[in-house]
Image (cartoon, grey):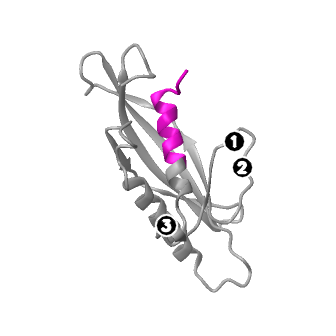
Amino acid sequence: MADSILEQIATNVLDVLGKITTDNGFENTVTASRHKQHGNEIADKLVVLFQEDPAKSDAAPQGHIWWVQPFAAACFVLESETSTTAVDSRINSLRSDVERALCLDRNRIGLAVDTVIDAPNLIVDDVGGVSGIVVRFSVHYRTLEDDPYSQ
């Protein structure tokens, strides 16, 4: 059986994040991964995709459900002791690359109506230092009311 529309969207987002490379015209080359139940091994320029709680919208045509699916892309920056670049600069660059990549195809290859960038949050480590940023975004999509595998 084919994947649900939501799973196809999540797979597309991960694929898009994985294409953030300097060879593809971005400022950074990242490693993209979906959230793992027992955690992900944190590394420099790791982007971890989290799926958050969905919401229903009343805007759907009859026989359909309109979903707003929030996602979070946690972007990690690990500084070396000898780095001369401000961590904020690296975080800003990584955030911009992720947002740019997500906006290149707001319709998620025809699976969604829109992709909307939401306000980000900084990732603060145990000693109060900033170690990354969470880029938040929502994908708006429709499914048939009785079939989440079909639009």
Left or right placement of residue 100 versus residue 51 in this view: left
Of callouts 1 and 3, the N-terminal one: 3
- What predominant SS class does the magenta segment belong to? helix
The residue positioned 41% from the left and 61% from the top of the image is 100
Element on which disc 3 rests: helix
For mark 3, what is the residue? Answer: 24
The residue positioned 35% from the left and 39% from the top of the image is 110
Q: Which quadrant: the C terminus? A: top left
Q: Give the residue type at disc 3.
A: Asn
The answer for how far apart the CA atoms under marks 2 and 3 are is 25 Å
Relative image position of residue 41 (x, y in whole percent): 75, 54
Of callouts 2 and 3, the N-terminal one: 3
For mark 1, what is the residue? Answer: 36
Crowding at mark 1 (Cα within 10 Å: few <14, some 14-19, many 20+): few
Relative image position of residue 91 (x, y in whole percent): 54, 69
Tell me, yes or no, whether the two marked residues, 2 and 1, touch with CB atoms within 8 Å.
yes
Q: Give the residue type at disc 1.
A: Lys
Crowding at mark 3 (Cα within 10 Å: few <14, some 14-19, many 20+): few
Relative image position of residue 13 (x, y in whole percent): 49, 46
The answer for how far apart the CA atoms under marks 1 and 3 are is 27 Å
Element on which disc 2 rests: loop
Q: Give the residue type at disc 2.
A: Asn
- Inspect the magenta stretch and tell me whether residue 52 lies in it: no
Relative image position of residue 117 (x, y in whole percent): 38, 52
Numbered badge on residue 40: 2
Write the start and end of the magenta stretch as one range. 1-14
